[in-house]
Each structure stands twice: as C-alpha cells, then as structure tokens.
Image (tube, helix red, strand yellow):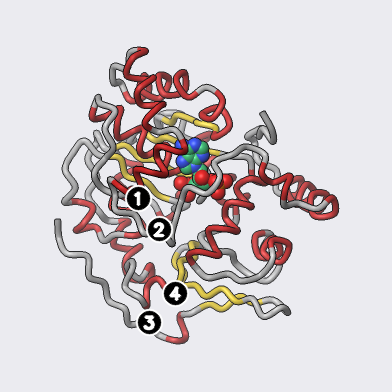
Amino acid sequence: MPERRYDTEVSEEDIIKVSDSHGNVMEFLEHGGQYISAKGVIMGKFPNPKTNFPRLKEMNIRSDDFFLCAYPKAGTHWTWEIMSMILQQTAEYHPLKKETHMLEFNTPEVLESVTSPRVFNTHLRPNNMPQQFFDKHCKTVFVQRNPKDVAVSFYYHCMQTIKFCGTFIQFMDFFMEKHGPVYHSAWPLYTLEWEKYFKEHPDHPVHYIMYEDLQQDPVSEIKRLAAFMDKPCDDQLANQIAEKCSFQNLKTASDTVKGGDRSMSFYRKGKVGDWKNHFTVALNEEFDQYLQQHKTDTVYKYEI
Ligand code: A3P
C-alpha cells in the first residue's frame, strides 16, 4: 500500500471558520459543499479536500466494488464490518480499520491499491463521488438512522474529533446550520441529494438499511444484505456475523484487533432513542419544524 503522507500546508484564506456567540468555533476546508476538519489536514491525518476531491472524482473504480454511503453516525462502522464479513464469507474481523477504505480520508493511489473484493465507504454527497461509481453502477448500500439519534451521536463525535466544547443545545444550532456550514454537510441536504439520485437512477443498484432495523433484527438484515451482495449466507453464518458485530464485541475488537485509539471511539452507546436523554421539549419542537422544512422521503423510526 502506498505510504499515507499528506501535504499539511493549508492556506489561511482557505479555512472556513464557523462560530457562535458562546465562543464555539469549527474550522473547515471545503470542496463541493463537503466540509472537512481543517485541523485534521494540518495534522496530516487526511488529505486536503481542495486538492484530493477533484482527484477522487477521476479515480479508477472496479465494477465489483461495493460502496457504503451514509451520513456520519448512521452506523457506517457497523455496516462496513458486516459487509466485509459477508464478502470474506467468514465471521472474522477485517484486519484494517474502516477508515483505510474511506474515500475522503485517502488519496486515489491508496484506494486503488486496495485488493478486490472491497467495500469503499464514504460520507460524500453524490456530486463529490468518483465518476466511475456512476458509470459502472456499483452496488451501493445506503445506511440511514433517525436524525435525532444521528445528531446526538454527531455531537459526541465532534467533541472527540474537532474538539467542540459547547453544550448539546449549542451544538444543535451548528447542526441546523444557524451559524454557517456544518462538519461534513447538512443532514437534510445529504439525505435529499442521495434520495434524489437513487430515484432518478432506478438502474443504479441500491440497498437500504435502517440502523433501527439492524438493531432490532440483525440476522434478517444480514441475510437481506448478503442477498443484495449476491453472496451466500445461511443461518449459521448470519448468526455468527451478528454476534461478532454486536455493539460490545465490535467495540472490543476496535481496541484489540484494529489497535484502536482509545481516545477516539466510534462505539459510544449503540442505542436507539438516546435523543430523549438530550433533547429538551423546546429543542424537539424546533428540530421537528426544521425536519418539516427539509422534508425527506424516508420515514424514520424514533424508537423501537
Ligand atoms: P452512538 O454514538 O449513538 O453510540 P458511524 O460508524 O457511522 O460513525 O456511527 C457510529 C454510531 O453507530 C455510534 O452511535 C455507535 O455506537 C453506533 N454503533 C456502532 N456499532 C454498533 C453496533 N454494533 N450496534 C449498535 N450501534 C453501533
């Protein structure tokens, strides 16, 4: 695999600062309406989107590549591990972290060197996806989760990754883009754009997974997913994958098998309905109105 060493030079005028009156600040680099952490680039964690995204657009894709598309915190890690196990036909953890197969965190050279069969994952909006993804009609898995739980999970994620220090209520003003663009992209815009693309391209093979369904009946969802991927998956394999990918087992594996950074956990609570512990009545009303104004086609489950 080519070495991951990225250019950390960032021009001050490229940095977009979004702030509120409480002293909270988010700093991004943007390309095509996608906002990536400026600090992450400066620290050399991933490439600068300004130069890398146009190159990702041109990257080589293989027709048997699978794509996992999801808004951050919808359950990307969980689904990626399940898809990897289905592809490998064994309930063994992928030895690498999901991020090694993530479009926006890698250069085309690194991604193209990954051996097939492979599952790329991304939070990119359709306009930033590689052109060959569309041309080759790559099988796509689209994961969704109720936006209230997404928002809560994203809050904790932003505290860890971009060192957001405000309260959840203050974060929600950022999430609803009251101060400017939000990290990655706005949830309704992301969802609406993908819904539109799939609706207008019925020939693009897509499989929808809802986080809440995967939580409620993992074995059936794993079998449904395997059928879409055209891979055999009997009861025994589906049960083994469900067990290996339970919240607790994946959390442990991320520290042991994948040598995880304990200060950066993608396995926080893994529950449906945690939003009820964070939203006030007033915020819930406001967010419902926001969702109403940016209505998506998908119907979400807020509890199970
Ligand atoms: P919480 O913060 O609500 O716990 P992503 O991988 O897209 O970043 O999503 C992360 C969210 O998925 C986190 O949600 C994480 O705990 C949850 N998650 C990861 N693996 C899970 C599993 N096996 N079962 C349930 N939730 C899981």
Marks 3 and 4 close (CB-CB < 8 Å): yes
Residue mark closest to the camera, 4 vs 2: 2
**Front-lying residue, 113 or 163:** 163
Q: Looking at the rendered structure, which numbered label has been put on residue 214?
A: none
Vertical relation: 117 (above or below) 278: above
**Mark number, residue 10:** 3
Which circle, 1 or 3, is nearer the viewer?
1
Q: Which residue is mark 1?
A: 255
- Marks 2/3: CA–CA distance: 28 Å
Report whether 23 appears left or right of 240: right
Residue 193 visible to an observer of this rendering: no
Image marks 2 and 1: residues in contact by CB distance under 8 Å: yes
Q: Is mark 3 within 8 Å of ligand 1?
A: no
**Mark with earlier residue (4, 2):** 4
- Please state which amino acid type lies under the numbered disc 1: Asp
Of label 2 and label 3, which has the lower sequence position? 3
Callout 1: CB less than 8 Å from ligand 1: no
Q: Earlier in the sequence, mark 4 or mark 1?
A: 4
| Vertical arrangement, residue 50 with respect to residue 269, above or below | below
> Is the residue under label 1 in contact with that under label 4 (CB below 8 Å)?
no
Q: Earlier in the sequence, mark 1 or mark 3?
A: 3
Q: Position of residue 230 (x, y in %)?
A: 30, 21
Q: Which residue is mark 4?
A: 38
Q: Residue at x 52, y 75 (%)?
A: 27
Could you tell me which residue is drawn at 47 percent across and 37 percent down? 247
Residue nearer the viewer, 45 or 216: 216
Secondary element under disc 3, as helix, strand or loop, is loop
- Give residue 118's position: percent from left, percent from top: 25, 39
Q: Residues under labels 2 and 1: Cα distance?
A: 7 Å
- Residue 18 can be seen, yes or no: yes
